[in-house]
Amino acid sequence: MQRAEPQDFDRVLSSMCTQPHPAAREAAERFLATNPGDPGTYETVAELEDRAVELLGTVTGHPNPNGYVTSGGTEANIQAARIARNRADTDTPNMVAPESAHFSFTKAADLLGVELRRAPTDEDHCADVDAMAELVDGDTVLVAGVAGSTEYGRVDPIPALVDLAHDVDALCHVDAAWGGFVLPFTDHRWHFGHADIDTMTIDPHKMGQAAVPAGGFLTRSEDLLDELAVDTPYLESTSQATLTGTRSGAGVASAVAAMEELWPVGYREQYHTSMENAEWLAAELAARGHDVVEPDLPIVAADMTMPVTEDLRQRGWRISKTGAGEMRVVCMPHVTHSMLRSFVADLDWY
């Protein structure tokens, strides 16, 4: 049987994952067989997970964070909704999110029996606080905002959403799964240091350049994480707050290695490179007559006809579409200026 080989990255323009940093790759291989879900047995990787949470707190403006390394943003978003549901005193819980919120909130609603109410976004694809205010009520347990949306890279007005949530005694969750490692180098107000956010998703395996899977889930206080704890009678540890039990230490070790290698200088340099690439591509597409959603973070969306999009895929370009049908390019660390020039050259055939 022919040996299978993974997808290379030289034409991948739509993924929010990237090639891991060499230090992250090496750490993942070393800790592949360890299990942070059993910290009593695997003490070294448990200590590394504490370090990962500490580093994530540094990135997100939280001096004393709580949390753990997840399988990704979906698990973290589910856990945020689970905390909010568990602490609330209602039989009919609901959560309110903008239309731009990730589809994992739909999964969370289905799994947890929480009604999901989605509000329309404004003309710049950000959360409309007034529209969300019309949906909250006494049974609202969670108000969610996005810091780096998956379609347009937009950042919601997080401090205003925190106020909205706390006015009805709900929690405020910020999904910064993709944006968390670029936002520290912008003027956006999005993290624990900017507002009394309760929970946050931030994924090292996206712009953080860790190996997959290495997501992140943070809480403002330990008591919120305790809402998730269950007894673990046959392990050396007495309780567990994670959603999964057995987890590979590869993600934990790789996240620590990437952050220690790149924070903050490497991530700052990568942010500027990615933004320069996004702005160049947006200008090139606009010059060719396409309507472009101007990038705020390094994501470019532009109108393209379906035949062109399909032909580009036939040429090997891995591109996706927004819900409105625009072509979407994510300028991840592996996306170089040379790649984008080749992409535009192929586009010029049409």
Image: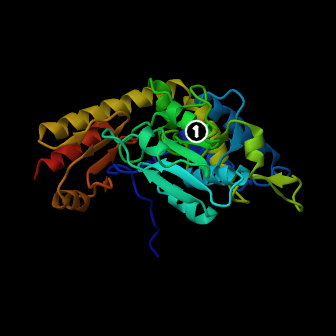
Q: Which residue is mark 1?
A: 23
Is residue 166 something that shows in the picture?
A: yes
Q: Nearer the viewer, residue 216 or 166?
A: 166
Q: Nearer the viewer, residue 248 or 182?
A: 182
Q: Residues within 10 Å of mark 1 (few under 14, many from 20)?
A: many
Q: Residue at x 74, y 38 (%)?
A: 50
In the drawing, does residue 311 fall left or right of residue 5?
left
The location of residue 210, given as percent across then percent down, is: 55, 43
The location of residue 252, given as percent across then percent down, is: 66, 45
Mark 1 residue type? Ala
| Secondary element at image label 1 | helix
In the drawing, does residue 30 fall left or right of residue 276?
right
In the drawing, does residue 319 fall left or right of residue 35?
left
Farthest residue in the bottom direction?
1
The location of residue 219, given as percent across then percent down, is: 68, 40
Q: Nearer the viewer, residue 43 or 285?
A: 285
Q: Nearer the viewer, residue 320 or 224?
A: 224
Is residue 341 something that shows in the picture?
A: no
Q: Residue at x 33, y 55 (%)?
A: 323
Above or below, comparing residue 268 to residue 337 in the picture: above
Colour approach in the figure: rainbow
Q: How many marks?
A: 1
Above or below, comparing residue 52 to residue 73 in the picture: above
Q: Residue at x 63, y 35 (%)?
A: 56
Q: Residue at x 56, y 52 (%)?
A: 95
The location of residue 281, given as percent across then percent down, is: 24, 37
